[in-house]
Image (tube, grey):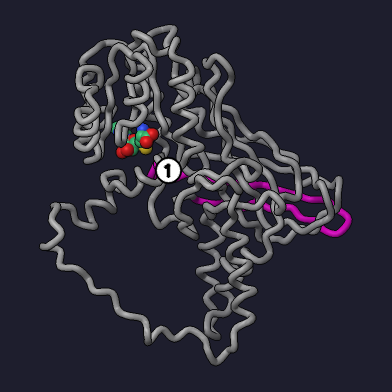
């Protein structure tokens, strides 16, 4: 799940390329190209046609942009993005189709069903009944989709919040959900899954996926830090550094090229979705990142993986820089300091993660880091907010 549209720094369409396409790289390329330009040919678009805004009354539908702002999952676009993320969707499909023994004659609850895709997979794999709960307007589409595909007798779509609906059965054997947000925990839908687990899952029931881990690494990122952060130092000759401070606080969701990685990857936290309690989404984890070459470090990068450990053979996917790209990309946390690090030196520190008290869908991150190296001696605490 995810993901406000327009949140990303570059909306790369689809993440289903075989190579790990990096928008960092794209930007670098664009910057080089720009330098080749004759200054006098700079950026006037007077010749560009002005788009003809279509008349709303001709389009039909009763949704306004305000509806979508508060409920982006009602629009098909976000579901299209998720469905086309083949790493994501095919992993769920494989888990379900290749482990029919888990699903046959079982009652399944699909938490946050969206288009109903996971429910359809489960029905096809032989589930006795699937309850597909979806709170956005997409629930109406899911009902139509279930009917159109002849699964109305197996799948029941329930429109409403998991926390508010009345489930026609007292217990379910399996809970399946795709609840992961940027930085794993943004939007905090995990709470909803844990709520459902505690309320309806039978004693030896299973949660899919059942394991999620958060990792940290460090990258060289001078070009992009220049473009996104230092940019505010001088905007057409004016000092806009107050915005730079805000830009530093908001982690950037973007793909990172694996060649940018300067250190090893460190596991920060593993969550067992079948056992954890809601409070476990707040934690402090220490880290030690060891430089694998001499380089600069501009940012730390967080990413996650999820696992389905109850499968015949361990299945899952990673959203890390070394894996095939997904729509979650990675989460880049820029450092105030540019660290100069030598091979073998370590950045040590801790990361504290907690849902924002006022708005639990936002995530607060506190990063403490220090490097006592040959060229850099730094010790600092930085605060970030995913919102
Ligand atoms: N399962 C679908 C959609 C995943 S996105 C797929 O894999 O493609 C997560 C979905 O959960 C969104 O459609 C969102 O509207 C829904 N959702 C989020 N919180 C919910 C809640 N508390 N109750 C019901 N649905 C919820």
Q: Nearer the viewer, residue 365 or 257?
A: 257
Residue 304 appears in which quarter of the rendering? top right
> Magenta segment range?
357-385
- Quarter of the image for the N terminus: give it: top left
Q: Percent x, y for residue 74?
A: 26, 44
| Residue 382 drawn in magenta | yes
Q: Is residue 192 above or below residue 385?
A: above
Q: Nearer the viewer, residue 244 or 109?
A: 109
Q: Is residue 42 above or below residue 225?
A: below
Q: Residue furthest bottom?
A: 40
| Residue 54 drawn in magenta | no
> Disc 1 designates what residue?
84
Q: Percent x, y for residue 141?
A: 22, 37
Q: Is residue 248 above or below residue 285?
A: below
Is residue 301 something one can see in this rendering? yes
Is residue 160 something one can see in this rendering? no
**Left or right position of 50 against 243:** left
Ligand 1's image quarter is: top left
Q: Residue furthest right?
A: 374
Beta carbon at label 1 within 8 Å of ligand 1 = no
Secondary element under disc 1, as helix, strand or loop, is helix
Query: What residue is drawn where x is 66% and y is 34%?
Result: 267
**Left or right position of 107 against 29:** left
Q: Percent x, y for residue 274?
A: 48, 18
Query: What residue is drawn where x is 27% and y is 21%?
Result: 131
């Amino acid at each position: 799940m995810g993901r406000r549209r327009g949140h990303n720094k570059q909306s790369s369409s689809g993440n289903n390329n075989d190579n790990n396409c990096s928008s960092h790289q794209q930007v670098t390329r664009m910057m080089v190209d720009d330098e080749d330009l004759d200054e006098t040919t700079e950026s006037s678009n007077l010749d560009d046609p002005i788009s003809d805004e279509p008349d709303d009354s001709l389009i039909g539908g009763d949704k306004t942009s305000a509806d979508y702002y508060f409920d982006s999952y009602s629009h098909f676009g976000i579901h299209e993005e998720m469905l086309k993320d083949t790493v994501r969707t095919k992993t769920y499909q494989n888990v379900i189709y290749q482990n029919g023994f888990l699903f046959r004659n079982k009652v399944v609850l699909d938490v946050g069903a969206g288009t109903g895709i996971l429910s359809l997979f489960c029905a096809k794999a032989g589930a006795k009944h699937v309850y597909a709960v979806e709170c956005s307007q997409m629930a109406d589409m899911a009902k139509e989709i279930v009917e159109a595909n002849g699964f109305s007798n197996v799948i029941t779509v329930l429109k409403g919040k998991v926390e508010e609906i009345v489930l026609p059965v007292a217990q379910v054997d399996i809970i399946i959900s795709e609840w992961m947000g940027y930085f794993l925990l943004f939007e905090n839908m995990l709470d909803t899954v844990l709520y459902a687990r505690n309320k309806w899952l039978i004693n030896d029931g299973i949660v899919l996926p059942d394991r999620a881990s958060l990792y940290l690494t460090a990258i060289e990122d001078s070009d992009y830090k220049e473009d996104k952060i230092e940019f505010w130092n001088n905007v057409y000759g004016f000092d806009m550094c107050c915005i730079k401070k805000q830009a530093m606080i908001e982690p950037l969701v973007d793909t990172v090229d694996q060649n940018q990685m300067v250190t090893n990857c460190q596991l920060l936290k593993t969550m067992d979705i079948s056992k954890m309690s809601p409070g476990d989404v707040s934690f402090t984890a220490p880290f030690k990142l060891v430089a694998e070459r001499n380089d600069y470090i501009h940012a730390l990068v967080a990413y996650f993986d999820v696992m389905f450990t109850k499968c015949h053979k361990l299945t899952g996917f990673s959203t890390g820089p070394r894996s095939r790209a997904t729509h979650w990309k990675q989460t880049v946390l820029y450092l105030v300091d540019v660290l100069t690090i030598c091979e073998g030196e370590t950045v040590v520190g801790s990361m504290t993660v907690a849902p924002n008290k006022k708005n639990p869908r936002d995530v607060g991150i506190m990063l403490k880091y220090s490097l006592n190296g040959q060229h850099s001696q730094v010790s600092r605490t930085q605060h970030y907010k995913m919102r």
